[in-house]
Image (cartoon, helix red, strand yellow):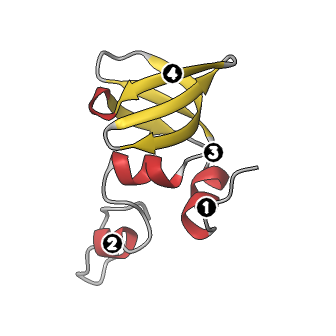
Amino acid sequence: MACGEGNGNGNNAVGNCSRFFPDNIEELLRKLVCECVVLTYRNGNKERVKIECISGDLLVAKEEGNLKFIDMGCICGVTASRETVLDAIISPFDCD
């Protein structure tokens, strides 16, 4: 069963998922600091980056050895492996 689908008992699964997962993109990105992800921008472009840090509305990422400074308002999606997301949510913040 996916988030948002009923479980057949009249209960909505959304409440159960929201206990574990961030409520918005910004919260998710903050948990994914030090991880490699694919960012999807509002213009439809996608880019694989390593999130270095977040300061206010500014995400600092590393791409091909260069630092990029990205306005959080430009990001509308994040793609990461299931393992990466679950580790980021369950484990305390830890950069290698």
Residue furthest right in the image: 96
Mark number displayed over residue 49:
none
Circle 1 packing at 10 Å, graded few (<14), some (14-19), many (20+), is few
Residue sitting at x 66%, y 54% = 83
Query: What amino acid is found at the position of numbered circle 4 in the picture?
Result: Lys
Query: What amino acid is found at the position of numbered circle 2 in the picture?
Result: Ala
The residue beneath circle 4 is: 68
Where disc 3 sits, the SS reads: loop
Mark number displayed over residue 13:
2
Closest to the observer: 44 or 50?
Answer: 50
The answer to the question of whether label 1 and label 3 lie on touching residues, with beta carbons closer than 8 A, is yes
Question: What separation in Å lies between label 1 and label 3 (alpha carbons)?
Answer: 9 Å
Upstream in the sequence, badge 2 or badge 1? 2
Question: What separation in Å lies between label 4 and label 2 (alpha carbons)?
Answer: 37 Å
Viewer-side label of 2, 1: 1
Which x, y percent locates residue 49?
58, 28
Upstream in the sequence, badge 1 or badge 3? 3
Circle 2 packing at 10 Å, graded few (<14), some (14-19), many (20+), is some
Mark number displayed over residue 93:
1
Where disc 1 sits, the SS reads: loop
Q: Is residue 67 left or right of residue 55?
A: right
Question: What separation in Å lies between label 1 and label 4 (alpha carbons)?
Answer: 21 Å
Which x, y percent locates residue 65?
69, 19
Upstream in the sequence, badge 2 or badge 3? 2
Circle 3 packing at 10 Å, graded few (<14), some (14-19), many (20+), is many
Where disc 4 sits, the SS reads: strand
The residue beneath circle 3 is: 34
Question: What separation in Å lies between label 2 and label 1 (alpha carbons)?
Answer: 27 Å
